[in-house]
């Protein structure tokens, strides 16, 4: 994962302003997020073909190997560690969304799991204190601030996204307190653990991913509508499928 360090103070000060300008441009289309806006479908399909080829050659075999090598407990520990590492970034987004309950709970989760949970090895916060993970990101922060969804995008290696979520992904890199204070060697270790977790997720959700990529009539359209439905459900707390276009319709 990209880690950006040692930025100048002037650049860091200008980042929020630049990010907002980019966000306005990226999210100007599809402000209500109720349709599919995909004006660059040809380019997106090329990115999808590339992603599908990489998955077939690398990620799917790696996921199968992960399933053969790792126990369920091993997988749970890796997920716990990665979840703990991402919690400070979530707390920052909670604060930006004026969600004080989420901010307090995520801060407590990180504090408890980093101490009693041995740096996230165990999820003591959830198991003993009832503090379940509170998922959020800067894409959701932009949504809370009123930015539209923007155009659908498929990013090389990163997969399905939207203009708003792409901006959110980039800004989340800068919002990560853990990444800002760790040394290059520690950052490399963190990136390695996150990479292992990604491979583990490929194994865990193999049936779903294989169904979309290799068993659907049009894997691009299927992955597009699956992503948008789930992302909109997460952001809005539910959405009617009638609000989405037929993915197989001629566009």
Image (spheres, rainbow, N blue to C red):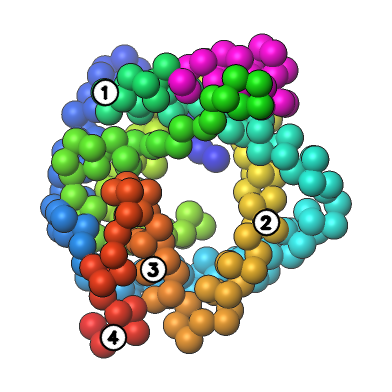
Residue 118, magenta (yes or no): yes
Front-most of 144 and 54? 144
Residue 58 to residue 113: above or below? below
Q: Which residue is drawn at 39% across and 76% down?
A: 221
Q: Residue 233's x, y, as percent?
A: 35, 54
Q: Is residue 94 left or right of residue 34?
A: right
Tag of residue 249: 4
Residue 69 to residue 106: above or below? below
Magenta residue span: 105-125
Residues at marks 3 and 1, CA–CA distance in whole angstroms: 31 Å
Q: Residue 132's x, y, as percent?
A: 54, 30
Residue 234, magenta (yes or no): no
Magenta stretch: dominant secondary structure: helix
Residues at marks 1 and 2, CA–CA distance in whole angstroms: 34 Å
Instruction: From the image, state whether disc 3 or disc 2 is nearer to you.
Output: 2
Which residue is the site of mark 2?
204
């Amino acid at each position: 994962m990209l880690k950006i360090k040692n930025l100048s103070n002037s650049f860091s000060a200008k980042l929020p302003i630049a990010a907002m300008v980019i966000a306005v441009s990226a999210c100007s289309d599809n402000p209500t997020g109720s349709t599919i806006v995909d004006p660059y479908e040809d380019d997106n399909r090329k990115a999808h073909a590339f992603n599908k080829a990489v998955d077939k050659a690398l990620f799917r075999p790696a996921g199968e190997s992960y399933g053969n090598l790792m126990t369920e407990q091993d997988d749970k520990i890796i997920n716990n560690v990665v979840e703990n590492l991402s919690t400070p970034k979530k707390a920052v987004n909670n604060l930006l969304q004026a969600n004080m309950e989420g901010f307090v709970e995520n801060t407590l989760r990180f504090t408890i799991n980093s101490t009693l949970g041995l740096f996230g090895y165990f999820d003591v916060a959830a198991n003993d204190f009832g503090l379940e993970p509170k998922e959020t990101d800067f894409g959701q922060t932009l949504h809370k601030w009123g930015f539209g969804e923007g155009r659908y995008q498929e990013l090389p290696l990163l997969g399905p996204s939207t203009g708003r979520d792409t901006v959110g992904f980039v800004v989340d890199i800068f919002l990560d307190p853990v990444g800002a204070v760790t040394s290059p060697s520690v950052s490399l270790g963190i990136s390695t653990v996150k990479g292992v977790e990604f491979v583990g997720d490929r194994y865990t959700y193999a049936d779903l991913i294989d169904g979309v990529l290799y068993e659907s009539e049009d894997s691009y359209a299927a992955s597009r509508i699956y992503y948008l439905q789930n992302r909109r459900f997460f952001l809005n707390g539910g959405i009617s499928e009638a609000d989405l276009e037929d993915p197989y319709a001629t566009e």
